[in-house]
Image: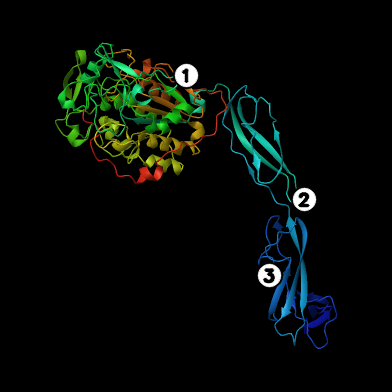
């Protein structure tokens, strides 16, 4: 084969370099330079190379990616349409004019290409709907897709359809108003239709937020529809409840003997104490309520979801015992905080040698105690046996409110290093990063625990709301039940005589708020609940056996939920202090209680 020299032909400004080979024409590259008119005499036509651009979707502005003509002749390129233009769908004719820098040697040249502009695909937003109960018809709550451009949406199955139990696929077909520039598009989401809706089918995460030391009359006084009192009896003398802010520095007696005196065989008239060691501003100081201006976040939650005004603490004493009932439904008959805790701040197996916790005695007395380290079964044991994940968020490891430090087989197992987590604020970052155990306990730092005493603040309601907001704005919201309670009455007045179900309790009323997309909205529960109810509910959610302790005689919170309702989208609770405030706050580093 003999290769020949290339021949350059020129016609109307097109210069085609042709390489001849024996038997025909081999190859060439198109170099365009047509001005649409006769070439001026004596001037050469500049060659312009411009490859056909790749197709683009409608809505894409022209840029250097498409407008990328080149020439070996120096000069200025002018494009029509110009960069930044958004061409319509279909063929777009692009033209370029090259004005050479050397106009004495070269004439102006032009070239054109055809750009294919495809119709754009509209963006469809359609969050997967909450599960629905069998028998419920499809409606706007499930068929709520939206598109990025105007148009109409047709659903299959259509609104009004009643689906069988099981998992189904819903389809939305979007037809844009502008069919020239936009394509029709389909979107699908799954929906679960539950034959028998209930805790085990609708709830996958249980979160217990345990605050400190407030009676119902103290924290929700005057709440519309709830049973509260504005006055109480002090040994037959009527006492008006007075406003005392959360940050007031005086703690109130909430020991077991103090409870016995407050209760007074059901008379509910012994809350006033004259013991000088208590350092009360007045003998009737416990007859008080927290001003509503300080409790707006938790009142907001109570108004939106379920508030329980017949929630009782399980025990008749302070926090150590209350937290044992929260995780185990018992306390091995201990009825006080361990002695010496005001020095070490440690309430469990890590307490200093010689530490004891008193045992329940008759008629409001304490008996000589035992070392605060036990081996009874807890909710964590049931969860571990079934492979259900759990986390216990505490301000500090070995801090007094760390209930699992008092359970020997938890303290000295891998659970202690994997499931007991500090600081407690890590719950905020864990949820934000997509991590929430199936069962979670959240314990506050003293400063925002609502516990009275030196160093107390009014930040507790914001702390509670921040935890709720974190979960409510996460992917966990639609499958979560949040149970908010206060561990004991804190010594503050309450007017309701608690039922005595066994020698340990019940204790006085404490507030309960149930927050969930499945909680009854704007509902006040007048059903008797206690910490054993939390255990019973959790056992039902995860299909666990009973601990056989207080959970066995407690209700399961069923009146607080409606699993047939259409859940509402979570609305964040306004707060004064947001997540960064608590994440950056220094821990109190003090014993949590001094009773």
Percent across and percent down for residue 331 are 27, 22
Residue at point 55%, 31% (across, down): 568
Query: Where 249 sits versus 315, above or below?
Result: below
Q: Of the residues under marks 2 and 1, which one precedes in the sequence? A: 2
Q: Position of residue 217 (x, y in %)?
A: 35, 22
Label 1 crowding class (10 Å Cα cut-off): few <14, some 14-19, many 20+?
some
The tag on residue 180 is 2
Q: Residue 384, image x and y in percent?
A: 38, 31
Q: Does residue 576 appear left or right of residue 506 in this picture?
A: right
Using the numbered discs, state the Cα–Cα distance from disc 3 to disc 1 in whole angstroms.
70 Å
- Would you call the spot at circle 2 few (<14 residues within 10 Å), some (14-19), or many (20 or more)? some
Question: Which residue is identified by label 3?
Answer: 68
Q: Which quarter of the figure has residue 352?
A: top left
Secondary structure beneath disc 3?
A: loop
Quick one: 25 or 231, which is closer to the camera? 231
| Residue that numbered label 1 is attached to | 559
Task: Indicate the quadrant where residue 386 lies.
Answer: top left
Residue 194 found in image quarter:
top right
Q: How many angstroms separate mark 2 from mark 1 (CA)?
A: 55 Å
Image quarter of the N terminus:
bottom right
Q: Residues within 10 Å of mark 3 (few under 14, many from 20)?
A: some
Q: N-terminal of the two: label 2 or label 3?
A: 3
Helix or strand or loop: what does disc 1 sit on?
A: helix
Residue 493, percent from left and from top? 30, 20
Name which residue lies at 74% across and 85% down: 103
Q: Does residue 329 appear left or right of residue 471 in this picture?
A: left
- Please report whichever mark, 3 or 1, sits nearer to the chain's N-terminal start: 3
The answer to whether 199 appears left or right of 488 in the picture is right
């Amino acid at each position: 084969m003999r290769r020949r020299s290339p021949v350059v032909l020129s016609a109307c400004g097109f210069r085609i370099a042709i390489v001849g080979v024996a038997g025909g024409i081999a190859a060439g590259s198109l170099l365009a330079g047509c001005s649409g008119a006769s070439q001026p005499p004596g001037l050469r036509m500049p060659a312009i190379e411009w490859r056909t651009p790749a197709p683009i979707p409608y809505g894409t502005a022209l840029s250097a990616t498409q407008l990328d003509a080149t020439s070996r002749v120096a000069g200025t390129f002018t494009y029509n349409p110009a960069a930044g233009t958004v061409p319509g769908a279909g063929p777009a004719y692009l033209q370029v004019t090259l004005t050479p820098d050397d106009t004495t040697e070269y004439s102006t040249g032009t070239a054109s290409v055809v750009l294919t502009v495809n119709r754009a695909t509209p963006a469809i937003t359609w969050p997967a709907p909450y599960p629905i109960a069998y028998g419920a018809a499809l409606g706007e709550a499930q068929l709520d897709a939206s598109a990025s451009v105007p148009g109409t949406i047709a659903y299959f199955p259509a609104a009004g359809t009643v689906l069988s139990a099981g998992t189904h696929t819903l389809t939305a077909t979007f037809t844009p108003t502008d069919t020239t520039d936009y394509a029709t598009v389909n979107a699908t989401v799954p929906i679960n239709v539950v034959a028998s809706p209930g805790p085990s089918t609708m709830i996958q995460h249980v979160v217990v937020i345990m605050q400190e030391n407030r009676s119902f009359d103290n924290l929700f006084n005057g709440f519309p529809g709830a049973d509260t009192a504005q006055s109480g009896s002090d040994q037959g003398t009527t006492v008006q409840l007075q406003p005392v802010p959360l940050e007031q520095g005086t703690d109130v007696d909430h020991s077991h003997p103090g409870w016995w005196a407050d209760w007074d065989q059901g008379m509910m008239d012994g809350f006033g104490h004259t013991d000088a060691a208590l350092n009360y501003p007045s003998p009737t100081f416990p007859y008080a309520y927290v001003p509503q201006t300080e409790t707006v976040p938790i009142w907001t939650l109570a108004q939106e979801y379920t508030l329980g005004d017949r929630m009782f603490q399980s025990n008749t004493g302070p926090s150590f015992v209350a937290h044992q009932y929260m995780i185990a439904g018992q306390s091995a008959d201990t009825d006080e905080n361990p002695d010496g805790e005001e020095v070490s701040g440690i309430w469990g197996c890590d307490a200093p040698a010689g530490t004891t916790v008193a045992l329940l005695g008759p008629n409001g007395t304490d008996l000589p105690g035992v070392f605060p380290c036990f081996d009874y079964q807890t909710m964590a044991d049931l969860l571990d046996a079934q492979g259900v994940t759990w986390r216990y968020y505490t301000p500090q490891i070995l801090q007094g409110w760390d209930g699992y430090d008092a359970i020997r087989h938890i303290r000295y197992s891998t659970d202690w290093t994997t499931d007991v987590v500090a600081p407690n604020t890590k719950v905020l970052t864990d949820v934000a990063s997509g991590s929430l155990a199936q069962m979670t306990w959240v314990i506050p730092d003293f400063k925002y625990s609502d516990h009275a005493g030196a160093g107390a603040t009014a930040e507790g309601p914001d702390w509670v709301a921040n935890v709720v907001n974190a979960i409510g704005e996460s992917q966990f919201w639609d499958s979560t039940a949040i149970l908010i309670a206060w561990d004991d009455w804190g010594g503050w007045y309450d007017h309701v005589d608690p039922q005595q179900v066994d020698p340990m309790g019940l204790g006085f009323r404490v507030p309960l708020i149930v927050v969930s997309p499945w909680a009854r909205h704007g509902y006040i529960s007048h059903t008797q609940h206690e910490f054993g109810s939390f255990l019973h509910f959790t056992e039902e959610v995860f299909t666990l056996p009973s601990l056989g302790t207080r959970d066995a005689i407690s209700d399961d919170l069923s009146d607080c939920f409606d699993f047939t309702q259409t859940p509402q989208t979570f609305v964040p609770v306004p707060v004064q202090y947001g997540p960064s405030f608590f994440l950056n706050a220094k821990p109190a580093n003090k014993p949590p209680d001094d009773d």
